[in-house]
Amino acid sequence: MIPLVLPAMSDAESPFVTRLRSGKGLTDDAWDSLMIEEDGGGVTYAGAGGILAIDGATAKALDGDVVLVQPRHGRMERILRAGSPHNTLLVTERCDQLCVMCSQPPKKTHVDRFAYLEQACLLAEPGLHIGISGGEPSLFKDKLLSMVERVLRQRPDLSFHILSNGQHFAEDDVLRMRDPLYRRVSWGVPLYAASAPLHDEIVGKVGAFDALQDGFATLLMAGARVELRTVLVSSNLAAMPNLSRFVASRLRFIEVWSIMQLEHIGFAKGRWRTLFVDHREHFGMVGRAIDWATMHGVRAQLFNFPRCTVPPAYRGIAIASISDWKRKYPNVCFGCSEQANCSGFFEWHPDEEARAMVEPL
C-alpha cells in the first residue's frame, strides 16, 4: 500500500501547500520546495514554507508530488502524486446519508480545506484528471463549484470527476453548469435500486430516491456528464435487472453505468456476511442487467471485479478500477495474462478470501 500521509517537520507556523522537487534547477514556481538533503530516514527540502523534513520516503518517490504540510500535527499529506492517474481530493467527511456499506463512515465535523486543495490543483502536473470525494462534496456546493471553476479557468489542461449523491442540485444550478468549463467535469452519482423503498433503505435516508430524481433532472438540463454508480449488495442483487430497465428508459443520458463490487472496509467490514454477494455464484442477475443496458445503448462496466471471477463474456468490461495506492494482487495472480487489465483487490480485502477467489488466466 502506498502511504499518502507521512511524518514531517517544518519550521512554518501554519499549514501550507508545496510541490516537491528533487533536482537542482527544477524549481520554477514560488510554491516549489527543492531537496537539499537525503539520507536513510527521509528527505529534507527548502522552499515555499521554509525547511521541510519528511520521514519514511525517498526523494525519487516524492519528486513532483504536491503536498499539504501541517506543521502542528507533524505530518504531510500527498494531495496529488506525480505520475499517478489516481488522485482524489477529500473535501469533506460530512455526509447526509448513512449507506449500509459506506467505505468511509461520515463525521459530523467539517474541516474546510478548499483553499489548500485549490492551490494544490493549480500546481498539478499537466493533463491531470483529478477526483473529488467526501463525505458529500455538494453539501458545500458553492465552494465546490467555485473552486472547480477557478481551477479550470487557470488550468485548461485539467479535468475533474466528482462523487456526489446528486441530491443537492437545484434549478438555479442549470445555467451555471451549462458553462463550457463543465465539459471537463464528470459526476459519479449512485443509484442502488429502481424503487424508493429499496434505494432509501440502502442509503439510510427517507426521501433520497425522490431527491435524486430531481437531481438527475437538473444534471440532464445542464448537459452534465454523468457516471452512474451501483454498489452490489445482497439486498439489491435480485433488483438489478429492474434497475437496468429503469436506467435504459429514464437515464439514457449517462456516459456509463459502473456496477461495483463491495469494499471490505467501513460499515461493510462488520456486515460482510450479510451484505457481500459472491458474484462467482450469483452473476446471473448482474449479467442480465448488463445485457439489457447494452442492448439499449447504455454502456456498462464492472468495478472491483477481478477478471478471472466473472464469466468470459464479461471480462472485457471488468476494468482495473482500484486506485494504485490501495490495490493488491494475491501471490497466485503473478504471471496471470490479465493482471495488467485487472482490478485486483483492495489492500484491506482478507488475503485468504482473495486467494480463494482467483484462478489466474
Image (tube, rainbow, N blue to C red):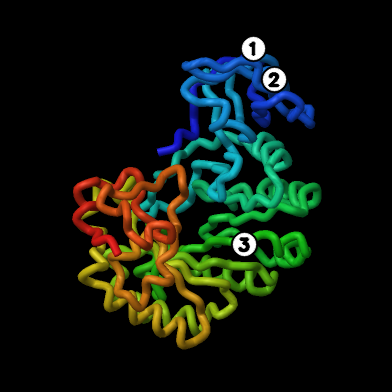
Q: Residue at x 50, y 20 (%)?
A: 55
C-beta proximity under 8 Å, tags 2 and 1 = yes
Q: Which residue is mark 2?
A: 49
Rendered image quadrant of residue 195 = bottom left
- Total marks drawn? 3
Point out the tag, 2 or 1, that comes first from the N-terminus: 1
Disc 2 from disc 1: Cα separation:
8 Å
Disc 3 from disc 1: Cα separation:
39 Å
Q: Which residue is mark 3?
A: 186
Point out the tag, 3 or 1, that comes first from the N-terminus: 1
Q: Position of residue 81 (x, y in %)?
A: 58, 39
Q: Is residue 297 visible?
A: yes
C-beta proximity under 8 Å, tags 2 and 3 = no
Tell me if mark 1 has few (under 14), some (14-19) or many (20+) residues whose alpha carbon lies within 10 angstroms of its own: few
Point out the tag, 2 or 3, that comes first from the N-terminus: 2
Eye-nearest disc, 2 or 3 = 2
Q: Residue at x 80, y 51 (%)?
A: 153
Q: Amino acid at mark 3?
A: Ser
Tell me the SS state at disc 1: loop
Q: Which residue is mark 1?
A: 11
Tell me the SS state at disc 2: loop
Q: Position of residue 70 (x, y in %)?
A: 58, 23
Q: Position of residue 177 (x, y in %)?
A: 72, 63
Using the image, determine if residue 162 lies above or below residue 13. Answer: below
